Image (cartoon, rainbow, N blue to C red):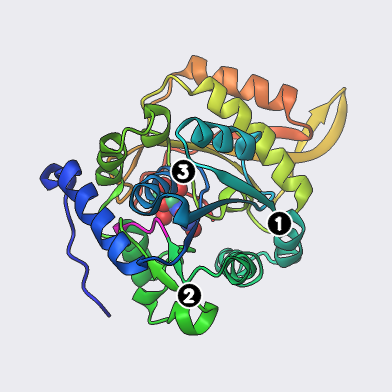
Amino acid sequence: MIKIQEIKAEDLNPAEFIAQKTKEISALVGQGLAINALSGGVDSSVVTMLGHKALGSRLKTYFINNGLMRRGEPERIVSLFKELGVTVEIVDAQKEFFAALKGVTDPEEKREAITQTFYKSVFGKLVKQSGAKYLLQGTILTDVDETVAGIKRQHNVFEQLGIDPQEAFGYKIIEPLVQLRKDGVRKTGKGLRLPESLYNRMPFPGPALSARVIGEATPEKIETVRAATVILEEELAQTPAFQYMAILHQDRVTGIRGGKRDYGLQVEIRCWDSIDARNAKPTRLSYDTLDKLVKRMIGEVSGVVSVTYNITPKPPSTMEAV
Ligand code: XMP
């Protein structure tokens, strides 16, 4: 296993880092083509801009709509990048992802199903069609650490696990951010002149909303958690928290609706203060904020009869529930 040399955010000189990585990417890809998938998160946005700087139109950027994104996300991100001069193509792969997730309840099996669908079925095909030999990817050091430690299998870590992507999927992976943690990636994004709404964006996991559904991620459950996420993001937009999330539980609980027993859904809210996601503490949200969140969740998200706020720190919790 290769030992990765960490660059701490305080030691990072963004201009130098950008110049060095741009040079490395150009040298590796040469006159060929590279491909990358933009999810709209901080890491993939920074990688897209780095790659664009290095390769221009020789980098083909796709937004894979896996059906697990937040509401309006594909269109919003594509239009944001268009304003930055980067063309991004949306690929509708919702059917493939939901087919792969069907009946899968175990967290790691869910990640594996998403990984396989992403790299083999959807991206593998795109790479073959495009003729690209290189895949640019926004893996960061925290992804590697947690995967190697066996805490969570991040969907974007291969070589560190001894899996050869060339052999498994037919292409080489370039990971220019792998020495950085989230704070270093944000600094790089600022250096690349990305809008603050992108480089300071809250992290969002690769498995997207399927990481926010405990048990099987069906289209219906994803829609429920998507609706809860809209409310959460509206209500908490002004908090300086590192990340917040709504989680749909698998177990139902007894509630009352219209004077009748309703065996309904439970949504759990988490909101984290953290610097680099390695440790995190729950944000001390005001009771008024929590109260408003609950009122909106039970009023606007169909079937929800219970809303809880988790106050367990990481560790022993992880930030995501799945
Ligand atoms: P955890 O849950 O491991 O999360 O404490 C730490 C940070 O990583 C994000 N996260 C993921 N990101 N694929 C990703 O790309 C994943 O499978 C995944 N799981 C967690 C999480 O949102 C948090 O910012």
Question: Does mark 3's beta carbon lie closer than 8 Å to ligand 1?
Answer: yes
Where is residue 45? Give x, y as percent. 43, 44
- Which quadrant, please, contains the C terminus? bottom right
Q: Residue at x 71, y 26 (%)?
A: 298
Q: Which residues are magenta?
A: 137-141
What residue is drawn where x is 18% and y is 59%? 6
- Quadrant housing the N terminus: bottom left
On residue 171, the disc is: 2
Q: Residue at x 65, y 20 (%)?
A: 295
The amino acid marked with disc number 3 is: Gly
Instruction: Name which of mark 2 and mark 1 comes first in the sequence.
Output: 1
Q: Do the numbered discs 2 and 1 sit on residues whose CB atoms are within 8 Å?
A: no
Specify few, some or many for label 3: CA neighbours under 10 Å numbering under 14, 14-19, or 20 or more: some
Instruction: Look at mark 3 in the image and give the residue it sits on.
Output: 41
Q: Within the image, what quadrant is residue 202 found in?
A: top left
Residue designated by label 1: 93
| Residue 317 visible, this angle | no
